[in-house]
Image (cartoon, grey):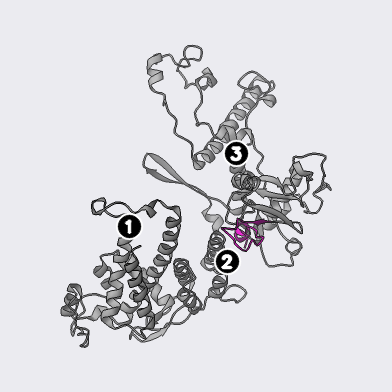
Amino acid sequence: MNRTVSQALAGLAQAIKDAPALAVDDALAVAAFIPVLHQTLLCPDPATGPEPHYLHDPRYALALATAAEASAHQALRTQIYAAHLVDDTAAHTLAQVELAAARQGTTDFSVPAQRTGMRPSFTGPAALLASWLRTDHFEAKRRIQSASHVFAQYDYQHQRHQAQFPLLARRFADLRQPPAEVLSAARRLGALEPQRDEYAAPATASALTEDGELLESIVNQQLDEPDPGTRRQLVNSFLKSQKERLGKKRPEAQEGLYRRGERGGLVHYDLALRPTRAELFESGISQSDNPRSGSGQAAREAFAQSPGQRTEQDAAPGTSYQADAGGHPDFLTDEEAAASEDPVSPPLSPAARRLNGLMNLLEINTKRLQELLDAARNGGTPKGADGNDAGTVDVPTITPQVVVMLTLDELEGRARTHGITQHGFKLDATDLRQTLARARIIPMVLGGRGELLDIGRSQRKHPNYMRLGVAVRDRGCIVPGCTMDPERCNIHHIWFWSEGGVTAVYWSAMLCDTHHHDVHAGLIKVIADDGVPKVILPSFVDPTQTPVRNSYHMAKAA
């Protein structure tokens, strides 16, 4: 940057700091200058001269990203503060001559503002803001509402009252806090507050939990969580549970599969499940998408039956089909059949793989039922499509399971809480009782049949019961911020097997593929902290090198 510009900006910053309060012209000049500053940071016009060399320096990119993020946060605070001033000053009651002067930039701030003596041009602050900024009415209304959450509220006589959420208001004013998350939490909390009468005086937050604790206080504490992903999960889970509690709805009455119509060439469905059935569904889908299993490999193939797999029995009634004559129905020529095939299959997305896994399960179930029906009609043993016994047919299969984590107090009924499934679904008291009534209780000390949790160096691979113990403890990848499900994770030897390590739950940790490679590449380190594995992140991420643990999975269970 030109040194003259740097000195001018430093002098401007110091002058603003030294001034007790800016004059109105100075304040508006600073506000108008901010967009100009941002404009100068964009890629310059090649016609004005050569491109600065620092635009190709990644260090400059990181420094600019940091400054832009701080600027965006402050811009959001200024937006809401401006909306608050529009409401506070009742700007919608300005006379038309004042509105015209404001638009033209010719306002005389040395004289008092003129108010209309007739019906105002706008019905309220939100209507004025939407028209003035040429923005959506709902966006303008949202800003005015956010201002009432963190700045001040007004009654029907326009008397000022304290902000609805005092704790969040202080957090919103803290420059170290992300303001968007605070405003989002405030809006969702506002929807849980009791509806007040039109003429009642505005009040501060009053919605309580079942135990009598203020909802705002709990959310304010949750926003102290340093990890962004965990923080959002904590707030979202808590507010969602409170919304369901206060709504007093019966979720089981809404369970089902809903077809929502066709959009963009696809038929859309909504699937609504109770937590216990959702856990079973998640377990099955996660296993069917696991690249280490046969079902996962099958899900990674396009969901289409190759011609050689079809039989005459699969064809529609009355249709002649000859599998050995080109692999297509006889009413199509070889050229027509070849032209109908997609020469290039697009890469499968994670969502497509999960769908393929589900469709494979449905297809396998249909084939097995057909084999059983054929065997019942013929009085023999079910045969597969290749003529072998059905029990020897090599098809990708999965075994969904429901794992519920609960404390001894919960098991004995001494705690007023809920069970948590392996994928983070909460079970209420009714679902928990029904699950436990059908369950095989496995204490995570030695396992259900006394399986050892330390088998030394007798084998390198962790047995299934040992993997379950690690999964229950870690609930997924242990690197902070990672959301990978336990079915997609590896069991890592904290004490490297190649260095004499042992296969034991104490010396094991769950890591996704990416972070497992990062450990062996030396980017991150995993340590065993009294039986609970923790991660030491790179120094450029955490200069303090403090051992940390992923709290995202625990937040889902909160």
Q: Which residue is mark 1?
A: 42
Magenta residues, start to end: 534-558
Q: Which residue is mark 3?
A: 288
Q: Nearer the viewer, residue 319 or 35?
A: 35
Secondary structure type for disc 1: loop
Q: CA distance from mark 3 to mark 2?
A: 34 Å
In the image: residue 418, left or right of residue 87: right
- Magenta stretch contains residue 90: no
Q: CA distance from mark 3 to mark 1?
A: 47 Å
Secondary structure type for disc 3: helix
The residue carrying pointer 1 sits among few (fewer than 14), some (14 to 19) or many (20 or more) residues within 10 Å by Cα, namely few
Q: Earlier in the sequence, mark 1 or mark 2?
A: 1
Which amino acid, by three-letter code, is at mark 1? Leu
- Magenta stretch contains residue 551: yes
Q: Main secondary structure of the magenta part?
A: loop
Tell me what residue is drawn at x 74 percent, y 42 percent.
Answer: 464
Place residue 554 in its image quadrant. Answer: bottom right
Tell me what residue is drawn at x 53 percent, y 36 percent.
Answer: 356
Tell me what residue is drawn at x 59 percent, y 36 percent.
Answer: 296
Which amino acid, by three-letter code, is at mark 2? Glu
